[in-house]
Image (tube, rainbow, N blue to C red):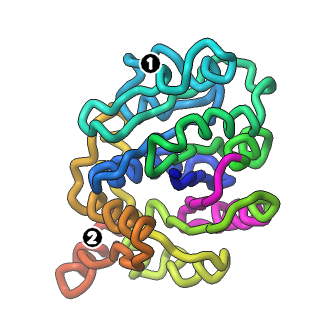
Amino acid sequence: MARKIVMTSGKGGVGKTTVCANLGIQLAKLGFRVVIIDVDIGLNNLDVVMGVENQVVFDITDVIMGKCRPKQALVQDRYLSSLYILPSSHTYNKSNINGEHVKNVISQLDSNFDYILIDCPAGVEAGFHRAVFPANEAIVVVTPHLSSIRDADKVLGLLDEYNIIYKGLVINRMRGDLLLNGDLMNIESIVRALNIPLLGVIPEDDAIGASCSVGGRLQSIESARAFTLLSENIHNGSKKIFDCTYKYRGFMGYFKRNIKKMV
């Protein structure tokens, strides 16, 4: 039976889809069978982020409407044979689809995968409930900004209404230079405010946005390491958190972060 994990945030623009995509890649690299499901119907872009938009024949709405079987709608990753994407629709009337429909699709894939990652739409409207309903675990993605933390807190309250047995936190777009200078909310404050276990910290890295915008693979050693630690923490229950501040410590680090601040 697969672990069914919904990736949510409440607030849009926190990088949830890119976190979901790169987590799926790292789990597949560890040898697990992974499918990433896009439930953001009408505003979906997971297929673009994963670089498979030209390979899409069917999507999740076609499965729900009985036009094809779930396996027919899956798109295999070009680089990792154990990684699949179930894309969403750009145009379908999403009001006709509910959580039971999505759960039925996932139940047909359950025995074939170790991990099913569900990319949840931003906000807390119908799309949120549709994505959360089939999951039994949730990862809440935030950035170190007060507005993101507030929205995440609202999401955590809503998750209590569902059969979510575990909730974990990922802090995305953390800048080590600003953190050391005291210009960002620190990690301890964020964890204390949301009161859920910290699973990972992902650094602010132009390489993440650049790779995902063209459907490429993450080349940054720093960010790849952060996602590797995140995937290991999720699977093994370990607590190794990437240190975003390491290159800004010491004399040279002090010089580097203050030069960056002036620029």
Picture mark count = 2
| Secondary element at tag 1 | loop
Q: Is residue 149 magenta?
A: yes
Residue that appears at 57% across and 15% down: 68
Is residue 67 or residue 203 the one in the foreground?
Answer: 67
Residue that appears at 53% across and 84% down: 188
Is residue 114 or residue 154 the one in the foreground?
Answer: 114
Question: Mark 1 or mark 2, which is nearer to you?
Answer: 1
Residue that appears at 45% across and 45% down: 113
Q: In the rendered structure, which segment of residues is drawn in magenta? A: 134-157
Residue that appears at 73% across and 40% down: 130
In this view, 253 is above or below 217: below
Looking at the picture, how far across and down is residue 181, in whole percent? 41, 81
Q: Which residue is mark 2?
A: 259
Cα gap from disc 1 to disc 2, whole angstroms? 46 Å
Q: Which residue is mark 1?
A: 56
Q: State left or right for residue 65 relative to residue 182.
A: right
